[in-house]
Image: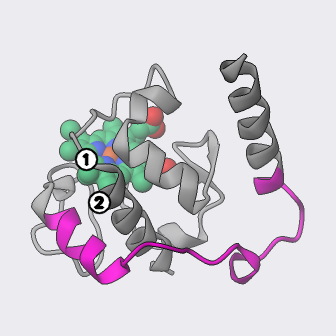
Amino acid sequence: MGAPIVGLVLCILVTAGCSPGEKPTERQPVVDADPSRGRVLLSQYQCGACHTIPEVPSSRGVVSSSLEGFGRRSYIAGRLANRHELLARWIEDPQAMVPDTPMPSMGVTPQDARDMAAYLLTLQ
Ligand code: HEC
């Protein structure tokens, strides 16, 4: 009963992300998250071992994509609409969102993931 509903909601979110002409400024505001705390957490969780992330100390990794300008991107990992909720869930458990992704689960708590997602969405 639960899974089909989650799937449906995901579908709606993903489709909404594709709507033509949408500008980043029209995105829903990020609530219950602190981007400046997220910036510090990105360093603490060592996301920078694999990613280059602007303004985050020791984040010069080149294993994966640079997260520069991530707030302007339409998709997460080319597949999920780049929305705060989905980005936070991706950071918390990437394989739950995209089963064959090479990004490891980093043991991130839900609130930490929300804060890191909020910071990444500020990057223009
Ligand atoms: C061991 C290397 C590694 C670490 C550490 C890592 N990632 Fe990733 N990350 C990846 C890979 C590989 C991908 C590409 C996944 C894909 O395309 O399926 C990725 C993709 C992403 C994306 C989507 C990028 C895009 O171009 O769409 C985001 C956002 C992201 N990671 C955030 C984080 C955050 C936040 C952390 C720290 C909690 C982190 N990553 C730690 C390897 C890593």
Q: Residue at x 74, y 45 (%)?
A: 14
Residue 64 appears in the picture as rendered: no
> Few, some or many C-alpha atoms within 10 Å of disc 2 (few <14, some 14-19, many ≥20)?
many
Q: Amino acid at mark 2?
A: Asp
Dot 1: what SS? loop
Residue lying at the far top of the rendered structure: 1
Disc number for residue 112 = 2
Report x, y in % for residue 31: 54, 74
In terms of depth relative to the viewer, which is nearer, 14 or 34? Answer: 34
Residue lying at the far right of the rendered structure: 20
In terms of depth relative to the viewer, which is nearer, 52 or 104? Answer: 104
Does the numbered disc 1 mark a residue whose Cβ is under 8 Å from ligand 1? yes
Does the numbered disc 2 mark a residue whose Cβ is under 8 Å from ligand 1? no
Report x, y in % for residue 78: 59, 43
Splitting the image into 4 quarters, where does residue 10 fall? top right
Q: Is residue 58 magenta?
A: no
Residue lying at the far front of the rendered structure: 1
CB contact under 8 Å: marks 1 and 2: yes
Q: Is residue 29 magenta?
A: yes
Q: Residue at x 46, y 72 (%)?
A: 32
Write down the residue under mark 1: 108
- Can you say whether 34 is above or below 115 in the image? below
Q: Amino acid at mark 1?
A: Val
- Can you say whether 122 is above or below 89 in the image? below
Q: Is residue 120 left or right of residue 20?
A: left
Residue 78 appears in the picture as rendered: yes
Report x, y in % for residue 90: 45, 44
What range is drawn magenta here? 16-43
Splitting the image into 4 quarters, where does residue 6 fall? top right
